[in-house]
Image (spheres, rainbow, N blue to C red):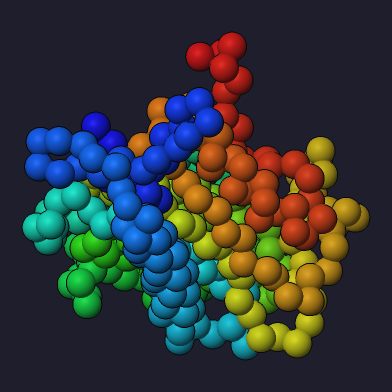
Amino acid sequence: MVPASVDGPHLIYRNEYFGAPIRNDADTVWMKERQIEAMYRARFDERRHEAEALANLYNDAATGRDTDKRAWLIAVAHPRLPASQTVRPTRDQAREVFEAAESHALVYAGRGGTHPLESVDRLNPRPGLRRWVAANTQKAEADRWKEAWASIHHDGAVTLAAAIGGHPIARDRNNPGDHIDSPALECAVADLMGLIRAVSERRGTNEYEVRVGIEWKLGTPLILQTADPFGHTYTGSSLPIARYAPVSTTVRADADSLDFYQQVHDLAEDCINQGGLANVQMIRPPAPSET
């Protein structure tokens, strides 16, 4: 049986011939040329819909952030096929997803950095437009540097928005708003992937289209910074970024644990490479021989 997919028609090759099978009640027959044409048209329309849905998610998550003061990470993921469970999740189910997402993220990245999911109200998600929202809990002026918002949508989509520039570097001193610590970026990627994994486990989603970007309007280049072997901030290998190009990828949410962990690493690597950094610090999946 061919699994649900937007990538029809499915072609079968036999020697020098190929055809596209289609179910007709209990039988399987070959598509006619017009049917194949219609299937490809539907496939291309679906791809366009996916791109529009992802762009709308991203723009929605980025709206209203104070990007004129500090850089914000915007990370969104949309399932290629909607959640197999059509019933809207309850508040309790949404709470379970947020809690599971945090647990997954801590496996991927540990506690050596700032996790946005630790700055949202995971235990009391609020209803939104066809979604549940984990609202920011960092409202005191001293804690506003780690403001974050997260949501899980009824169709299986997820979003994460986190203030990622201007984090503390000393007790009484913060980074400039256009300087980003690479561990904070890696932890945010781990949190996004934790949300994807948790939703997939409970809602039956599999493949996701993902976009991770950094938005700021400071008029200065963005700097991704790492740490030297002594733990001091290091920018010697950083490349100033005039515009951070959003990183897009397809994630297999139902992959086995090690494969999914590797996808978390690869997405984080793409995100930091853009700033001239080569090594992912926080996310270190075990080699196959270690499992």
In-front residue for pair 81/291: 81
Could you tell whether 197 is left or right of 246 in the image?
A: left
Does residue 103 appear anywhere in the picture? Answer: no
Q: Residue 134, located in which quarter of the rendered image?
A: bottom left
Does residue 38 appear anywhere in the picture? Answer: yes
Residue 199 percent across, percent down from the top left? 28, 49
Could you tell whether 64 is left or right of 233 in the image?
A: left
Query: Residue at left 69%, top 42%?
Result: 280
Residue 166's place in the image compared with 152, above or below, is below
Residue 12's place in the image compared with 147, above or below, is above
In-front residue for pair 40/201: 40
Query: Residue at left 79%, top 45%?
Result: 278
Residue 130 percent across, percent down from the top left? 20, 72
Could you tell whether 7 is left or right of 169 in the image?
A: left
Residue 26's place in the image compared with 141, above or below, is above
Residue 218 percent across, percent down from the top left? 70, 85
Question: Is the N terminus in the top left, top right, bottom left or bottom right quadrant?
Answer: top left
Q: Residue 67, located in which quarter of the rendered image?
A: bottom right
